Image (cartoon, rainbow, N blue to C red):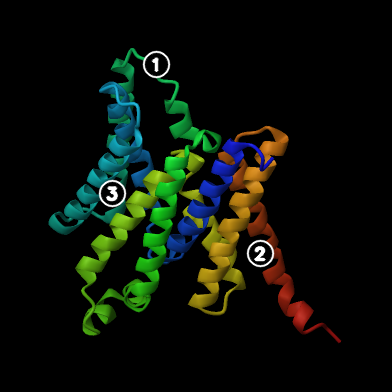
Amino acid sequence: MLTEAYMQRALAAALLLGPVCALLGVFVTARRLSFFSDTIAHGALAGVAIGIWIGLTNLTIPMILFSLCVAAAMIWLKENTELLTDSIMALLLSGSVALGILILSLVRSNRGELHSYLFGDLLAIEWQDVIIAAVLAAIVAFGLFRWLTPITLMTVNEDLATVNCVNVRRLNYGFVLLLTVTVALSIRLLGIVLVTSLLVIPPAIARPLSVNLRHQLILSVLAGFLGCFGGTVLSWQLNVPCGATIVLTCITLFIIALIFSKLRPRLIHPSP
């Protein structure tokens, strides 16, 4: 398996992006931004459609740019209107998907690559994608651990963070930027339909097993690593779609973690 170049690239990308999404996912779920990441992911469909429409060979750039536009629109609407956050996200998600479908209906050229962005095509990843994933992993890891304390304060209570001289506005923008780029790049791993699961499931695996934030971060990264590695290997052995296999592997790990968390008190303190 590892002698094949495409599997080497697939495993490298999965083992980079999986833990990165899991690491960000701890703060995404704590701040209840799962729907935000889902909106970004579905908004990327319009970016992909625009790239196909104008005849680009690399659709990653328009996908990231449009995702950033969606994120900026969410922040602007939240700060300048009285709309509720979930209403803003639903508005932009539905609008982006509708725009993407409309543009794709007008395109007469080959749209075969669209499938890989909708459902993921990890085995088609090139080495340049792996390099981008490695750079992103380094930036996310550095950013989160460099500003771990202020991000944690902001996650717990933004007013408390402000009192402790944290620039909440700037930190929010930085976090949203990292999250948007991570989601957009991870679409090649799982596809638009499933990418949010890699942000949500690993933290859900870690939460019942953790006693503090440090444990949750470590266990979430480990869960993302194991889920992506196991899912990629299983997809190759069973000849089934890679993205869906990764998600189902992560869900299996979640079920195991949930059962263990329920049995742990009995194992530690058995009944007389």
Residue 193 appears in the figure:
no
Q: Residue 221's x, y, as percent?
A: 54, 63
Q: Nearer the viewer, mark 3 or mark 1?
A: 1
Instruction: Name the residue carrying label 1.
Output: 110
Q: Amino acid at mark 1?
A: Asn
Q: Residue at x 31, y 42 (%)?
A: 64
Along the horizontal axis of the image, is 187 left or right of 74?
A: right
Q: Residue furthest bottom?
A: 272
**The disc label shown at residue 87, or none:** 3
In this view, the residue in front, 1 or 181, is 1
Q: Is residue 243 left or right of residue 36?
A: right
The amino acid beneath tag 2 is Leu
Three-letter code, disc 3: Ser
- From what the image shows, is residue 249 above or below residue 52? below
Task: Check disc 1: other Cα within 10 Å, few if <14, some if 14-19, many if 20+.
Answer: few
Does any portion of residue 207 appear in the rendered image? yes
In three-dimensional space, the C-alpha distance between marks 3 and 1, rounded to whole angstroms, equals: 35 Å
Residue under the point 26% across and 64% down = 172
Q: Earlier in the sequence, mark 2 or mark 3?
A: 3
- Local secondary structure at mark 2: helix
Classed neighbour count for the residue bearing mark 2: other residues with Cα under 10 Å, few (<14), some (14–19), many (≥20): some
